[in-house]
Amino acid sequence: MRIVLVLTVAALAGSIGGAEARPAAPVPPIVFSSARLDRDLIVMRPDGSRRRLVTPSGRDDSSPSWSPDGFHVAFTFYDGRRERVAVLGLRSGRVQDLGDGFNPDWSPDGRRLVFLDAENFDDLVTMNADGSGRRKLNLTGLGIDEQTDPSWSPDGTKIAFVGDGLYVVDGSGGDRRRVRPEGTAGRATWSPDGHRLAFDCVTNRFEVCVVGSDGSRLRGLTRLGAHPTWSPRGDLIAVTRGDTAPRILLLRPGGKLARVVKGLAADPDWSPDGRELVATHEIGGGARLYATGPSGQSLERLTEDRGRAGSAAWSPDGRWIAFRRFRGRRCSLRLLNVATRRARTLLLRVPGPWCIDQPGWSPDGRRILYSAGGDLWSIARQGGRPRRLTRTRGREESPRYAPDSRSIAFVARGGIWLLRPGGKRSLLVAGGYDFSWSHDGRTLAYLVWDGQRETFDLYVREEQAPARKVYDSVADAPSWSPNDSLLAFTYSTSDPDPISIVAVSDLAGNARDLFDDATQPDWRP
C-alpha cells in the first residue's frame, strides 16, 4: 500500500518555472513537520563570509554554475522523478525550468549549456540557454555516469568531461579524444588560459589531478577533495571535501592549501570576477515546517528555526500558523505570519514534559488553545498573559473548539471529553485519542488504540451513525480538507526501521503518500 516518495512527489518543482526564489504565490495548504535534508544555493565570498541564500525553497538545489555575465546561475533540482536543469536570475530571483538534466555548465558566450543527460546518465546534452535547441552528443560507452560534470573550454570550441578517463570533444560531440586514462566520473574544469585541466582522477595517492590539455605533465593535486573548479585568475582551484559534512577547500595549482571555507557547502563555482562563490548549502539538523499540496505537486519550506519545529495549526483565516518549537530542553509556542514567513514567540517556555501537542484556534482566530503542565490554556494571538482554562490532577491535552463554538473538546484519561461553558464535563468518545471535527461539524475523525497490534487506528463517526475504521497505524491527529472529503494524517510503517509518512486519504481509506520523515499535518481551512 505504501507509495514511495519518488513516485508521489512527481511534480515537486513543476511550479517553479518563472517563479521567484521566494514565491509570492499562496503557500500550499498542508503544513507539516519534517527533518528532511534540504539543499539550497548560497553566494558568498571565498573566505566564507557575507553568505546570502539565493534559492530558499523546499527543493533540492545543487550543482550551480555561474553565467559569464554574472547575472544568472544554472543549477540542478530534483522534481521527484529525475534531475532537471534550471536558470536563476540573480537580479529578479526568477527561476526558469529548462527540462531534464544534471550538472550544467555555461559556454563562454553565455548562449549555450552543456549538462548530463538525466534519462540514463550515460550521455551529454547541449542546449540553448533559453531551453531550445536541445541535442544529445552521442557519447555513450565512455563511462559517463551521474557524477559526470562537464565544462566548456575558454574559447568555446571544446567540452571536457570525465568518464572512464578524461575526455575532450568538440561542441557537437565529435573529434573525441581520451586525454588521460586516470579520470573517474566527476568534474573536469579548464584553466582560464585553456592550457590545463583539473579533474577527478584515480591514482595511488590523489583524487584530484591537473594535466595539460594535451594530456602531458600529469600532477596529483590533492587526496582531500573532489569536483575541482578553477578560479577566473587561475591562481586557485576550489574542491569539495567530504559528503556527510561537506567543506570547500581552496588550493593553489601546485596543491598547497590556501584556505578552508567555513560552513557546510559543496559544488563551488566562481563568479566571473572571482570575488564570490556560488555553492550548494546543505540544511539539516532539526525539524522544520513545510507546506505541500494534496497531490504532493509542490513543496515549500516555511521555517528556518533552530531546534525542532512541529505541531503546526492553521488559523481559521489561513494567515497564521501556530506551532511549537523544542530547543535544548525548552518548549515554546510560536506564531508564523504566512505572508512574511516571519515567526515570533508567544510563550518562551511552555511548562510540562510534552512538546508535541498541537495547538487549537478559536473560531474567530483571536485566541490559541494549548496544553501545558497537564492543563488547558489559551493565549491571545497578539500575545500577553495566558488564561488558564482547567486545573486538574490528570493530564489534559489537544484542546479544540467544538462545532457549537463555545464548548472545548480535549483528550484526557478515558477518551475524548467535552468541557461546556459552565464547566460541566462529559465523555464524548470512550477510548478516543487525537481528533478533529469536519468543517460542517457533522463528522468526527479520531484515533483509537488497538491493543492487539499496539497501534492507533483512524475512525470517523458522523453524528449518531456507527463509527467506521478508515486507516491503521496512524500516529497523529487527522486534519480535514476544506470540503471535508479527504483527511491528512501521519502513519508509521512496520518496517524494521519504522518511519513516519504524511498521507492523504478519502473516507473509504484510499490513501496516497505525500512525504516520508514527516509528521503532524494540518490542512488550511
Image: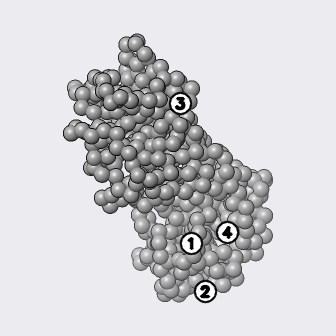
Looking at the rendered structure, the secondary structure element under dot 4 is strand
From this view, report whether residue 317 is shown above or below residue 179.
above
For disc 3, the marked residue is 481
Question: Residue 142 occupies which quadrant of the picture?
Answer: bottom right
Looking at the rendered structure, the secondary structure element under dot 2 is loop
Mark 4, other Cα within 10 Å: few <14 / some 14–19 / many ≥20: many
Residue 95 versus residue 419: which sits nearer the camera? Answer: 419
Residue in the picture at 65% in, 52% down: 23
Say which label, 1 or 3, has the lower sequence index: 1
Cα distance between the residues tagged 1 and 3? 39 Å
Say which label, 1 or 4, has the lower sequence index: 1
For disc 4, the marked residue is 66
Mark 4 touches mark 3? (CB < 8 Å) = no
Looking at the rendered structure, the secondary structure element under dot 1 is loop
Which residue type does callout 1 highlight?
Arg
Residue 63 as seen in the image, left or right of residue 496? right
Residue 415 versus residue 208: which sits nearer the camera? Answer: 415
Residue in the picture at 49% in, 62% down: 282
Residue 107 as seen in the image, left or right of residue 302? right
Residue in the picture at 27% in, 33% down: 412
The number of numbered badges drawn on the structure is 4
From this view, report whether residue 3 is shown above or below residue 289.
above
Q: Give the mark toward the camera: 4 or 2.
A: 4
For disc 2, the marked residue is 235
Mark 3, other Cα within 10 Å: few <14 / some 14–19 / many ≥20: many
Say which label, 2 or 3, has the lower sequence index: 2
For disc 1, the marked residue is 51
Residue in the picture at 38% in, 23% down: 459
